[in-house]
Image (cartoon, rainbow, N blue to C red):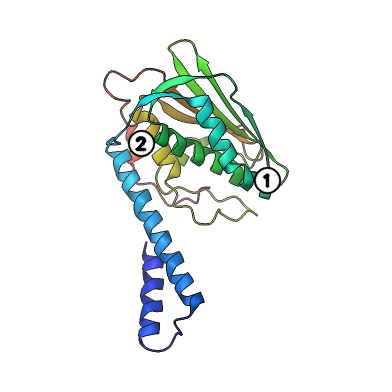
Amino acid sequence: MRTPITLLRGQIEGVADGIFIPDEAMFASLADDLHRLQRLAGDLSSLSRSEEAAFDLHRKLTDVATLARATAERLRPQYDDQTVALAVDAGTPVSASCDPDRITQILVNLLGNALAACDPHGHVALSVHTEASPGHVIVRVTDDGIGIVEHDLERIFHRFERLEHPGRPAAAGGSGIGLTIARGIARAHGGDITAESAGLGKGATFTLRLPQEPAPEGGMPQDPADSIDPSALERR
């Protein structure tokens, strides 16, 4: 958070000293830095709740398939802008007792990451179905993008990890904790998120599993590895 704070202080002091002219461009820049700080503060708050397994869930019977379709349509203009095809297989109603706002947060993260992983004319597939035993909703987001090496498949869920790929700039504006928060939300529901990839350049699949009924004790325990402070890798 030091960068936007330093920029804000420098700009405000410059205006006060008469170095900068307080015009529309200056106010727009100040607003951008404030928005970034606000987003970071919200992300860090969610991260704290995730690591403490303290999400306040507002569960209700929800059709996850409908939720997935709505989220996909919300993000489709971004996919169209980057000429990435988004296919959705979620036509059959699939109900679960969950917090729809929190599950939408997960879907936005997974679909956003998939889009960032793809080159122009890439493909992303979103599917929703049930797993009869032991009664779970399965949501999969698959892309044909940059892929993930095997030893990073778990590390990407650690906080502040954003992987760098040679010849490809890191996604701008990310805080590196989206997947950490998404997994925390899933585990608070008694579910989980996992990642699979055949390697670099071979795409990736992220799978969200949610129990259709609430877990007896309110969720799965957090993986101790998620609380380890890792070295600062760059991750999409």
Q: Residues within 10 Å of mark 2 (few under 14, many from 20)?
A: few
Outermost residue to the bottom: 18
Q: Position of residue 136 (x, y in %)?
A: 45, 17
Give, as a three-letter code, the residue at label 2. Answer: Ala
Marker disc for residue 225: 2
- The kind of secondary structure element at disc 1 is helix
Relative to 191, is 107 above or below?
below
Relative to 55, is 213 above or below?
above
Of circles 1 and 2, the one toward us is 1
Residue under pointer 1: 80
Residue 206 appears in view: no
Closest to the observer: 32 or 201? 32
Marker disc for residue 6: none
Question: Going 54% across and 34% down the picture, which residue do you hit?
Answer: 70
Give, as a three-letter code, the residue at label 1. Answer: Asp
Q: Position of residue 66 (x, y in %)?
A: 53, 27
Q: Residues within 10 Å of mark 1 (few under 14, many from 20)?
A: few
Closest to the observer: 152 or 68? 68
Q: Position of residue 163 (x, y in %)?
A: 52, 48
- The kind of secondary structure element at disc 2 is helix
Q: Position of residue 173 (x, y in %)?
A: 49, 56
Question: Going 42% across and 28% down the picture, which residue do you hit?
Answer: 192
Distance from Cα at disc 1 to Cα at disc 2: 37 Å
Q: Of the residues under marks 1 and 2, which one precedes in the sequence?
A: 1
Question: Going 48% across and 80% down the picture, which residue do you hit?
Answer: 23
